[in-house]
Image (tube, rainbow, N blue to C red):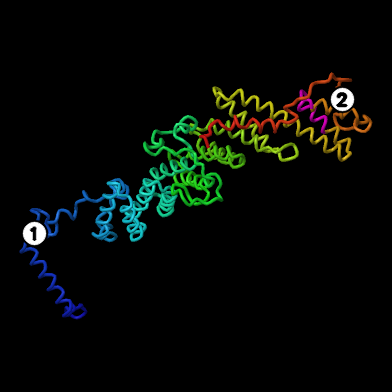
Amino acid sequence: MIGRDLPRPISPVARHKLAGVSLCLLLAVCSGCRSLRPSGGEGLFAAKDVLSTSKIRGPLERAFYNEEDALTRGEKFSPEAMATVELARKQFTERQYPQALKNYKSIAKKYPESSIGEEAWFRMGECHYAMRQYPKAQDAYDKLFADYPSTKYVSDASQRLFDIAKIWLEVSDPVAKSVIKTVSDEKTVEAGNTPPPPSSSPSARYGLIPNFFDERRPVFDTRGRAKNALKAIWLNDPTGPLADDALMLTASYYMKKGNYLEADRYFQILRDEYPDSPHLEDAFVMGSHVKQMAYQGPYYDGTSLVSAENLKERALMLFPSSEDRPKMREELKRIYLLKAQRAWSQVQLWKKKDNPRSVAIASMQLILDYPDTRYAEMARQEIRRIDPRRIQHLPGMAEFLKSLPDSEPARPSDSEATQPQNADKSGSADGSQRGLPGI
């Protein structure tokens, strides 16, 4: 009909496509689609392992079973490498440490940043430790921490470094148990690894003297290397059971050597970062002591003296049953006298500058703050020598001058206030022995 659209003819290309689709459908109907059905173990799903997840393990599970997945193992480790690993493990178990060390060195060089490379560095440290080559063992553990920050051997490596540090610092285990409280039984020195007696070699005491004969100690600076070993523990395993012990041992070492500023720094880290540590009381008591010992005198900065006073007062409040309470109270009295001495030094300073007004103000403040000290008596005598007409206009000075007694009986000089720092330093041996593992 005119005006009616006629159907368009199908092109040859479309005709061929339709024919192909029809043929595929016809074949699928005839075969019953058995190749697409999982029933009977036939078709594409005949291999049941393709869909099974029983052999798939995540990173944590692989670390727990000490292995990697098959794909990664096939990419990284050849059969020859695995044979070398098994041989090295066998040699290590049989205590053939030189042979195991040679194989582990080869593995660490060929397979860096891998699980067997991580194992190799740890086992190299263990081999050196077993052969009492402690400097090389420390180097291996440090390399392990540097290349594998999240290594699974962190606890074992920290234990070894702690033992090495005690050996180099010549700390025997019975003394360490009595003065350094441990958090767990894993921190005890293993049988057969008791630290040797103190060395008579000068190179063990003086870091600049080289050591060429004892392979148990480094060539230079034995005690410095020991401090580095302790530092590696609390830096690489800050939440581990040995971190607070390492800080305590380091602080005690500096305290024994008279480096009170460094000792104070480590005691403060221990107080701030490990409030649940069994060393907390010692960190407060000995920390306040080193702050007081760091005070240089009335003509130097008095911040450490004020900090020592505050720390002792906090320790008295936090540890009411501490056996060090009488000693801390005595030290607080001494700090009180030292502060009075500082106030008197200000009076002397203004007197040298011939400034009577400032002398009067400093004397009045000393008398008000420390009235029961001999420095207060000296300040009263000093303020009486000043002409009242020159200072009575100062705020509160007229009333203060009226309150002064006409004369005072002579009092004996306070020897503790005269030389408080020298007396404290001479008696520091008793104070520094507490908590020190015989360094």
In magenta segment, residue 364: yes
Residue 310 vs residue 403: left or right?
left
Mark 1 neighbour class, 10 Å CA radius: few under 14, some 14 to 19, many 20 or more: some
In magenta segment, residue 421: no
Q: What residue type is labelled 1?
A: Arg
Which residue is painted at 20% across and 78% down in the image? Answer: 5
SS type, badge 1: helix
Residue 348 vs residue 250: left or right?
right
Residue under circle 1?
Answer: 34
SS type, badge 2: helix
Estimate the x, y position of residue 353 in percent, counting from the top left.
Answer: 87, 40
Chain part drawn in magenta:
362-374
Which residue is painted at 45% across and 31% down in the image? Answer: 174
Residue under circle 2?
Answer: 399
390 vs 410, nearest the viewer: 410
Which corner quadrant of the image does residue 195 belong to? top left
Tell me which secondary structure the magenta stretch mostly adopts. Answer: helix
